[in-house]
Image (cartoon, rainbow, N blue to C red):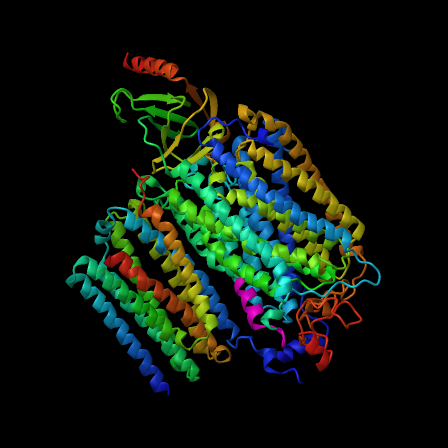
Amino acid sequence: MALTTNAMTMDRPTEPYGKVGTWWFLSSEIPTFGGVLVAYIVMRLGGTGWAEASQHLNFQIALVNTFILLTSSMTIVQAHNAAQEQDFKRTANYLGLTVVLGLGFLGMKAFEYATEISHGFLPSSGIFWSFYYGMTGLHGLHVVAGIIINLVLWIQAAKGTLAQHSHRVELAGLYWHFVDIVWIFLFPLLYLA
Amino acid sequence: MNEIATDAHAHSDNRSFVSRYVFSTDHKVIAKQYLSLSLFWALLGAGSAYLIRWQIAHPDTEAFGWGYIDPSVYNQLVTMHGTIMVFFVAMPLLLAAFGNFLIPLMVGARDMAFPRLNMLSVWIFALASIVLFASFFMPGGAAAAGWTGYPPLSAKNEYTGGGYGMDLWLLALALEFASFLLGGINFLTTAINMRAPGMTLMRLPVLVWMQLIAAVVFMLSVGPTIAGAILLLLDRNLGTTFYAPDGGGDPLLWQHLFWFFGHPEVYVILLPGLGITLEIIAVFARKPIFAYRPIIYASIIAGFLSFIVWAHHQYLSGMDPRLAMPFSVTTIIISVPFALVIFSIIATLWRSSMVFTTPMLFAVGTLGVFIFGGLTGIFNGSAAVDIYIHDTYFVVAHFHYTLISNVFFAGFGAIYFWFPKMFGRMMNETLGKIHFWLTFAFFNLIFGPMHLVGLGGMMRRIANPTQYDFLKPVEPLNIFITLMAILLILAQIVFVINFFWSLFAGKVAAANPWQANTLEWTTSSPPPHENFAETPVVYRGAYEYSLPGQSEDWLPQNLDLGDNAKAAAH
Amino acid sequence: MQSWFPENVSTYGGDVDGIFWFIFYIVTVWFFITEGLILYFVFRYRRKPGVKAVYAAGDTWAQLAWVLVPMAIVVVLDLFIDVRSADVWAKVKLQRPNTDFVVHGIGKQFNWEFVYSGVDGKFGTDDDIKTDNELHVPVGKPIQVILMSKDVIHSFFLPHFRLKQDAMPGRNIPVWFEATKTGQFEIPCAELCGFGHSGMKGLLVVHTPEEYQKWYREKTTGSGA
Amino acid sequence: MSNAQTRQTLLIWYWLMALVILSVAASYVLPKAEALMLIFAVALIKALLVARNYMHLKHESALIYAIVLVPLAFVIVFLIGMIPDFVYHPTKP
């Protein structure tokens, strides 16, 4: 009994496991994208012809995609807000909206790839295009994974089974925001610079 | 949730065979799955080592039990030997098997934080194993670009003569890394958030700390290599030019992406090995680990430093030569925290009361061998000496001394030490001691002379040293080393016999056969499904051996002595 | 033990060997101190009936000094090694002497191709001299080799000169050496470059200046004819 | 309270949208170098907004901060180590 002093529990963090685990996962994702971004930056700074190649990208599509992804970040926060209030109907709606926005992003991206390929810009067309397809492809895979997660949660919310583990919305949100942040840097690096 | 858990305890375990042994979420079963996979791979790794050594000693003759070794097959063997030993033996054995088994037991948790994630990670690893195994049978054979897979050699099939073997190799690595990422998340969350009451960070067994640091180092370093592997796959299959200089890429990019992880990886393997050594030495020296806190701080510092030394693998790669100096300084400075750890272990032995059981022999063996490996590392770290010894057998001998000390010696020590806890039976001591002395002798007879071969200038990965006049003086050594290597492999038969015999017929183990303090020994051998009948409460650090004023020379972490004694044992 | 190295025939080879031996003596002392202590403790402090181990957890500065002081010595020696090896590294890799003797060394699967600029002193012209796997140089003159690669990474290794440098496709990497002795020396490849890696062997022929001039004239007239 | 949260979420969203427009406008109006500086500063601000508000970093403990900041520090170390080889490369023809 006398042992339940401060010293006994002192340095055990109070965060839920899931949240800490998700953050650890993101911490390993940071160097993954960081490594490629760093490679892109240094090779672009030391290379030639990158800016000209980037002129061929469709800047409008990317701009719309930026708006889409930022908005989807907002909607998943709203889903989390709703889940905290145990309003699972609203949670489902916002999650559904997030999924739709994510699919919209992928659709636009697919259209963008198609136009570029039809103009003859393939992954093999040079180092800029290698990085363009490599980085957006890697990011796109993360978007796909995020959509699947959000979709599962949406189904659970719609079926009403989300109530026991509503914190999962927050975890999915953390991942989704991370994917969003990656895009926040990819957009200027590829399209604006 | 709690109700279900206590229910499972009250009644007999009624899970089906499949959910108990195959798709199990129990960290102990998962640990055994990792253990068996890594031992399986160790067989293949040893087989490849035998063929490599045969070819070096008797080039272009028929290897006993195999036949003629084609030069391209030789390159595949070299590549797969490195890949298997580092990624499919050392990591699953030291990290996954013992980390999984011991972290929850040592911190007093019922299981990992995310048991299903844990199961996923072992099955991803199994998938990686299948992919890597399948790569042997691809047309053109397995990957043949060295375990470092430097492009352009690895980027185009026409350079190696290989085919899908290389793609599968990359895929297997990516899957393996994904598996260990999930494992790492589990380790970290479990050890930080699921500690039993009273188990403060500074009361954690040092092995848990080492596993934690290793997991952090792994998770924060592996990303660039995963990305690099994906880029290499794209280069190979979609025609991108990340590593192709004629398309604006740069082969050096891969080396940076790879070694940014590749060097920390060394510490990922090394730290758990040191942790195991420390655990075993404390128990059998009957003495607290000398300088517990400084050891942990030093290991954390070493973990950090390991991120800023990666380019020492690239001194001669065409990297900017000015970079070699700062990286040489950081590389040699990393010896400082390890010096502290080593000195502390030696200080632990001072005025101790040592019992030389098999695990203790292996632990002291690790220490002795690792010191040698650490000291030869200074030569490699010095950029100037590296000009001559880079890519020679001196380097090969060095990293076998550091890594094998941790995989072979610490790994075997851990198996002998925790075997009773894992399987409920003791291993045979006589066979164990024979195994140790044979292993220790042959190991040193292989890799000691190998340094001299390296000083003679013999390059790594050459299939036929007899083609070179300047290597004539080392030929007798090569033949001797090969003979010793074969004997070392044969000596492991003693272990295999001991392992399987003990598994079924060994002496039944008590809960705490070694009279050790840490929490895993407070539960039965083997522990029940949820580890502890009730959550243990921790009153002290893990190494209160030979505490003055106690009648016993050990004091379990969870033993309540009452208030007065608590003040004494801080 | 000196005999384990191949004979040194370059101007800076002695420095590389010197730093090796410098480190060798330091680590040998450490080796005997640490392993000796372990051996001594192993025999001295075995379990004896009635003798308990000493409870020393290293939690006071007085105790910690036993590991901190040796550690401080390690730091000092490390820095010492760093400084000395930086000097040698700079001598071999950074401070390349000016020389008019420049050769291109081009690695390809699986041999070395060496290109001399010929009479006009320019590379890429018709009078370039190309040799396969043979590098001819005069003794006592700084030689600069610019390493290139046509396919994969190779490594230009001169064991007798204590020189090694990777040839990286897409980069032209200069290295230098100066022979102190005439003779024939092997040029192995030290970086895995494919199934023929082991047989990728060139020959470095160090001539006296007169012999070299003779060889060079034969080559120039030979290529002109 | 729920309204306050929603309002806050939307407010951040407005800011994000505005910042995107700002950086796009900058790329048209400003000279190249200044535009790039502004664009990357804005990207950083956007990332911070998302991380601090949407990912609740501003309410998190030191542990979570460490989990995020340490890998970022290593990425910067990686960048520094790569610059001499790829940005200044005297060995490239």
Q: Is residue A92 above or below residue B485?
A: below
Instruction: Inspect this view and state whether residue B145 appears.
Output: no
Q: Quadrant of residue B360?
A: bottom right
Q: Position of residue C209 (x, y in %)?
A: 37, 17
| Residue B186 included in the magenta stretch of the image | yes
Which of the image's four quarters has the N terminus of chain D? bottom left
**Left or right: A33 as drawn, with respect to B528:** left
Q: Is residue D7 above or below residue B310?
A: below
Residue lying farthest left? D29
* Residue nearer the viewer, A135 or C160: C160
Magenta part, dominant SS: helix
| Number of marks in the rendered image | 0
Q: Residue at x 60, y 39 (%)?
A: B48
**Left or right: A186 as drawn, with respect to C164:** left
Range of magenta residues: B184-199
* Residue nearer the viewer, B234 or A184: A184
Q: Is residue B8 above or below residue C78?
A: below
Which of the image's four quarters has the C terminus of chain D? top left
Q: Residue at x 84, y 61 (%)?
A: C49
Instruction: Inspect this view and state whether residue C163 appears.
Output: yes
| Residue C59 included in the magenta stretch of the image | no
Residue lying farthest bottom? D1
* Residue nearer the viewer, B548 or D37: B548
Q: Is residue A166 above or below residue C134?
A: below
